[in-house]
Structure formats: C-alpha cells, structure tokens
Image (cartoon, rainbow, N blue to C red):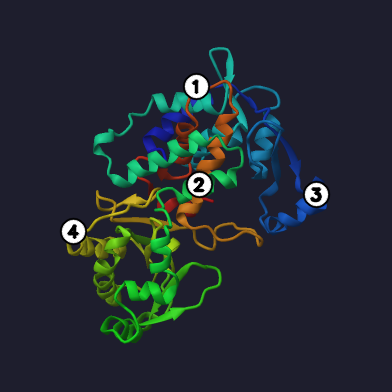
Amino acid sequence: MPEPEEAAETIDVLSRRTFRAGAAYELIVFDRLSPNEQKLLTDLRADPDFYGVLRPRTGTGRTIKAVGKETALLWLTLQSPGPLPFFAFRNDSNDAVSGIPELLLDGVIEVEENGRFLTGGEVAELIAKRRQSVSQDSRGRVALLSNAALRYGESLRLDDPAQLAGRLYGFGRQPVTPRWTRLLADRQAVLAFLGAGVGTDLRRHLDSGWQEANDGRMPGWIIWSNRARRKPEAGAQCKLYVSPAVSAMPQIFPVVLEVASAHVSHFKIGSDAAGLLRPDKMVLYFPNQERLFAIASELATMLKGVASHGVPFSAEITSDGLLSWGMDPPQTQKILAWQEPESWRLWVVRRLAAAMIAAQTDGQSSIAPSQFALERLRYEGVDVDTWTPSASIWHSK
C-alpha cells in the first residue's frame, strides 16, 4: 500500500490525467443478470453499495468482478474520456490511491500516456519501473521458492485460473513414492512415524493435552485442539508453518508439541503421505502476530540446523524456510454461501493465477505474466518481495 506522502503525490498526478472506461468489460446491474447468476450473487444484495458485475468480454482473459455503485458510476462516467470525476477523491486518500491503480491493472479503466490509452500490463510496466526491486541475494529460501513457482506457472500457459492456481498452490510437493505411501498410509501410520504410536510416551502426552478434532471441511489433516485452551480466542487467524524435510518430522514433532502445549490453541499435520510431503505439512494457529512471532523465535532456536522444505507464498521467518507465516482471511470477509473459505495461500495463488492469465492475453505489453501478477498483488496489500500480508487488507474489503 502507498505511504501517506506517496498518496498525496499520486492523487495530484491522477487528478491531472485523462482516463476512459476500459473495453475489456460490460457492466450489468444485478437485476439484469440471468436468474442463475442472480442466485449466485444473492448474498451481496445485503450490501447497500452493491451494484452488479463487470463481465469480461470474450478473449480478454479477465475474470468477472462484483462492483459497488461508485465503481459502476466511475466506469459509466468515463465512457467519455476525461479526468477522474470529483467523487473518486471524496473518500480517504489512501483508498483513492489504492483503488485507481487496481482498476487500471484489471482493465476496468485506462489512462492516457503520450497520446495512447494504457491499461493492464502496460500500466504494470510503468509502475514497475518506478520501484527498485529487492536484490535476489537478500531473499531467503521461501521467496526464491515463490518466484520459482511463478516461473513454473508461467511456463504452463494455462487458460483456466482454477487449474493454474492449483499448480501454484502445489508447487514444491515431494513425489508420493511407493515407499512413502506404504510408510505413511493413514493417520495411525503417520503417528507411528512421528514416534506417537499407540502405547508410546509421546502418544500418552499427546492424548492427555490435546483433543483430536473432526472437521469434515479439512480432509487430509489431523487436527488437534488444546484441552487447556478450549475457549476460542478473538483476533486474526495467523498461522505458523513448520516445514521440515519429511524425514526430519520425527525429530521436530515432539519439540513443537512441547512448545505448542503451553502457547497454541490448535494445530494440524498432514494425515498421510500426500499430507506430509506437501510443503505446509504442519501448521500452528495464533490469534495475533505478536504471539506467533514469540513462539517462532523460541522454535527457531530449538530447531536450528533441521533440514527444511519451505512453503511458497508464505512470509519468511527463518532464512532456510523452516518457519514462515501467513494470515487467513476472517469469516467476516465477504464470501458467498456457495464459496469455500480461503486459506492465506489459496487467497494468494487464486489472485496470482487470475492476473497471470489476464496478462497472457495482453498483446500490448512486454511485461511477463508473472511480473504483472506480482504488481497486481501488491495492490491487494501483500509485500511480494517478502510475501508478508498486511493486517489492513482484511479490513478494507
């Protein structure tokens, strides 16, 4: 997000530019949608600002966007090219600064530059030129894995956002070989592998302090809640990823369990070979960043030297990728009844995938689809050099 002084400067620049509505979409008010489309969006009618959708035209590579009345009015006003209307700057300056670039990057509006109207990738190129990127030498393993995932996704040239998001999300998984399939066949085999098989001291410690949860929404996981911390804690859903090499799981599990027993309300691990061979194989949950970082610091010391795996699209804590973090969207964020709640990494990769596919169809720009996706995600409130989420992004939606 822009800093306050940058916001003031950008508003001054934007106020002197000429804009027009983008040709990538058609605007449709809610009650002009088909009955099936209205049914999918019916939950949004409770929002007094809701107007309808911007539907992408064929061949643009864009995705449908639900929009409020002010965005709709802006798009309609700019059917005739001209400066941004007064109401674009009526709200808080930071809102204006973050909102206009997003609309430009998404192709909703276009801006004149040297006699041409630019949008999408060409706007991203202008933005990128003004930003000094972080040196690759200063980046840790997680950031490098994330960039490798983006390059891989770009090489696939997929045109289905869901498929591409799935590939990005799964990047870094180790192969599920016959050996691992036999060794980690199910929940009981996983616990035995971790040294917590039936009759062991570790299993007795686990059962005495933790209650296994049954959550049908999270297949593939073994989930425990702390018996001493049953009361739900208010706050952001911050998650600490503990990502060792799978062979190191028996070494680190009792250490993490001991620390978690005193400080963590619940945690989860993969329930079979596929679950433990994924990068985000063990996740601890916290109500705030302060507690997460305090526990992460303790674990970093205790687990120093453990072979790591590394979770792409998470925020680095240790440079080797063993510990990283993210922050799940709260359930209060707008979500339709038929949509599944998004985790942090799903939220990230779905937006990256949509932006990459949009960039692939943009014949006017030389910017790489992966770079365009990074520029777009910056305006969602993510520092894409470190993959650090901003706490404010969940309060601005």
Residue at coordinates 36% horizontally, 75% vertically from top-left? 191
Please state if 48 lies on the left or on the right of 99 as rendered. right
Return the x and y of residue 211 as percentages of the image width and height.
41, 82
- Mark 4 to mark 1 CA distance (whole Å): 43 Å
Per the model, the C-alpha gap separating discs 1 and 3 is 39 Å
Q: Secondary structure at mark 3?
A: helix
Give the mark toward the camera: 1 or 3. 1
* Residue picked out by circle 3: 31
Q: Residue at label 1?
A: 366
Give whichever of discs 1 and 3 has the lower sequence position. 3
2 or 3: mark nearer the eye: 2
Q: Residue at x 36, y 44 (%)?
A: 145
Residue 219 in sight from this viewpoint: yes
Counting residues from the start of the chain, the first of labels 2 and 1 encountered is 2
Q: Which mark is residue 304?
A: 4
Q: Residues within 10 Å of mark 3 (few under 14, many from 20)?
A: few
Q: Quadrant of residue 64?
A: top right
Q: Check contact, mark 2 vs mark 3: CB within 8 A.
A: no
Label 4, secondary structure: give it. loop
